[in-house]
């Protein structure tokens, strides 16, 4: 995410064994054959799935006991009434013997639930939807839950991090936010550690465009309504899902065999925002040369204009940008930031929110690399500028362990970027860029932690990096300028 200056902030088996009667050939009477015996399988104990994945920063986020493979989300939204109706189909695998399991859903009313086609009971505990299937779910078995729901969607209030989620706009709606957003418009396991693929069908009044993640699947119209289809087959963290409804200037095309789909709100006059979106594939191609193959099946971006959206977010394959980023010109720097996240943050996602610097540090450093590529600056100059001038709070806040209130602080972004430059200086360019490409390749479509990144960096570089990591990621004092190791 890039913030504006104003907003820095199987089934069970039964094994039966039988003894075979052996008849003797001597004159003695044969012994009676032993009775067949059975070894009963111990009775299963089904327990409730956890109402959270156990993230230290956000204990209630996500849920335990299962892993989602695919969501199919079908929603219909009427902006005039601010009314949403939807059906979510969740294909998942139990990772424990479950009597119940939870999904995150904020505010909306659940009308019915089935699990594997059978009616299931459900209750609500605040933003937790607790589902009790007709029969327990067995560890290792797949299951399919279908939830029908409706209501007036509202954003989630967060006094520390700001609101996130579904907002009603003058010409439609925007569903966007970090660290949570998805649960405001569909039931979900809302934590990046449980990535899944997604299919979306979004029905809106004729004349409006509905944009989401992934590859566009076309549109159909009937009775005054248009249904737009989108598909993101690569695993995606839930907060990276988006829905943007409104009136847009849409540009489509193809690049390297992938569809390109960009949309700029008609609230903005044609100009710098359109120019910036047209540069998306150019920026992506440069980043591909640095980070390795582009990880997704589509390119694009969406520019919105709403006072509540003062940031840009790396929504997978199609980032969403506040129009404010383009007031002074095309600003391809923010495009570089959000596109870098397609590798770092999206393809390689967080296993826990504490390691947010892995997302934002890489995206910030990508801005510096892009500036170097365009001859506007150099990565070293950008490092030096910040090393000399960032406020002291940046040095007091460790980006590797920032705490919840500083999750999106300058330390995470700027010091995170500086940490990567310090690593580059320490190990040299050849090793550094090999580390970056190897990290993106090895962790593609997965999740990762800081410890895993450091281990890979040490393996590739052959250098011991404890001192560098301690100073730049976890220290609370300004580190010495980096030197080659």
Image (cartoon, rainbow, N blue to C red):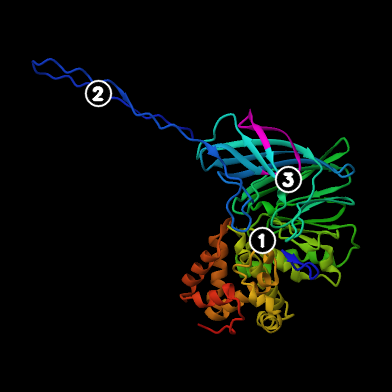
Task: Say which label, 3 or 2, has the lower sequence index.
Answer: 2
Sequence-wise, which precedes: disc 2 or disc 1? 2
Q: In this rendering, which labeled residue sits more in front, label 2 or label 1?
A: 2
Residue that label 3 marks: 106
How would you rate the neighbour count of disc 3 (Cα within 10 Å): few for under 14, some for 14-19, many for 20 or more? many
How far across and down, in percent of the image, does residue 236 sit?
64, 52
Give residue 4's mark. none
Mark 3 → mark 2, Cα distance in angstroms = 61 Å
Residue segment shown in magenta:
104-123
Q: Residues within 10 Å of mark 1 (few under 14, many from 20)?
A: many
Tell me if residue 90 is in the magenta stretch: no
User: Mark on residue 342?
Assistant: 1
Query: Is 66 placed above or below 350 here?
Result: above
Q: Secondary structure at mark 2?
A: loop
Q: Main secondary structure of the magenta part?
A: strand
Toward which corner of the image does residue 333 lie, by quadrant?
Answer: bottom right
Q: Are marks 1 and 3 in contact (CB under 8 Å)?
A: no
Would you place residue 28 above or below residue 290 in this image? above
Label 2, on which residue?
A: 20
Q: Is residue 334 above or below residue 181?
A: below
Please name whichever residue, 58 or 151, is drawn nearer the observer in this view of the structure. Answer: 58
Instruction: Give how far apart the Cα atoms at labels 2 and 1 are.
Output: 63 Å
Tell me where residue 289 sits by quadrant.
bottom right
């Amino acid at each position: 995410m890039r913030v504006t200056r104003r907003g820095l902030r199987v089934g069970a088996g039964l094994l039966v064994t039988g003894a075979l009667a052996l008849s003797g050939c001597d004159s003695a009477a044969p012994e009676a054959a032993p009775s067949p015996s059975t070894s009963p399988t111990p009775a299963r104990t089904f327990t409730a799935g956890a109402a959270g994945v156990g993230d230290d920063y956000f204990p209630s986020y996500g849920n335990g006991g299962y892993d989602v493979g695919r969501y199919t989300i079908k929603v219909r939204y009427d902006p005039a009434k601010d009314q949403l109706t939807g059906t979510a189909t969740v294909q998942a695998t139990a990772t424990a013997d479950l009597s119940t399991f939870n999904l995150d859903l904020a505010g909306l009313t659940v009308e019915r639930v089935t699990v594997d086609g059978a009616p299931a009971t459900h209750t609500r505990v605040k933003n937790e939807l607790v589902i009790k299937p007709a029969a327990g779910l067995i560890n290792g078995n797949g299951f399919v839950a279908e939830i029908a729901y409706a209501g007036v969607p509202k954003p989630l209030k967060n006094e520390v991090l700001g609101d996130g989620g579904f907002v009603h706009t003058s010409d439609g709606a925007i569903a966007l936010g970090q660290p949570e957003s998805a649960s405001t418009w569909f039931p979900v396991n809302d934590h990046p550690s449980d990535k899944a693929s997604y299919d979306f069908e979004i029905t809106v009044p004729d004349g409006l465009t509905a944009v989401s993640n992934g590859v566009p699947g076309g549109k159909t119209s009937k009775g005054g309504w248009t249904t737009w289809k989108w598909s993101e087959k690569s695993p995606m963290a839930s907060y990276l899902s988006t829905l943007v409804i409104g009136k847009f200037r849409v540009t489509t095309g193809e690049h390297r065999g992938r569809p390109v789909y960009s949309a700029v709100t008609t609230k903005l006059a044609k100009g710098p925002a359109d120019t910036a979106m047209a540069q998306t594939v150019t920026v992506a191609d440069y980043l591909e040369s640095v980070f390795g193959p582009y990880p997704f099946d589509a390119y694009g971006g969406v520019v919105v204009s709403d006072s509540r959206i003062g940031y840009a977010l790396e929504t997978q394959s199609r980032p969403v940008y506040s129009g404010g980023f383009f007031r002074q010109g095309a600003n391809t720097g923010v495009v570089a930031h959000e596109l870098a996240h397609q590798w770092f943050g999206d393809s390689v996602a967080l296993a826990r929110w504490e390691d947010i610097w892995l997302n934002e540090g890489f995206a910030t450093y990508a801005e510096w690399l892009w500036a170097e590529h365009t001859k506007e600056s150099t990565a070293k100059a950008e490092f030096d500028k910040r090393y000399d001038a960032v406020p002291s709070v940046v040095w007091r806040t460790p980006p590797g362990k920032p705490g919840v209130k500083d999750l999106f602080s300058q330390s995470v972004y700027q010091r995170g970027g500086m940490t990567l430059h310090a690593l580059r200086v320490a190990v040299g360019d050849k090793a550094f860029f090999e580390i970056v490409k190897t990290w993106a390749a090895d962790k593609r479509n997965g999740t990762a932690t800081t410890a895993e990144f450091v281990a890979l960096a040490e393996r590739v570089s052959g250098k011991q990096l404890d001192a560098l990591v301690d100073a730049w990621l976890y220290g609370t004092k300004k580190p010495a300028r980096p030197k080659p190791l």
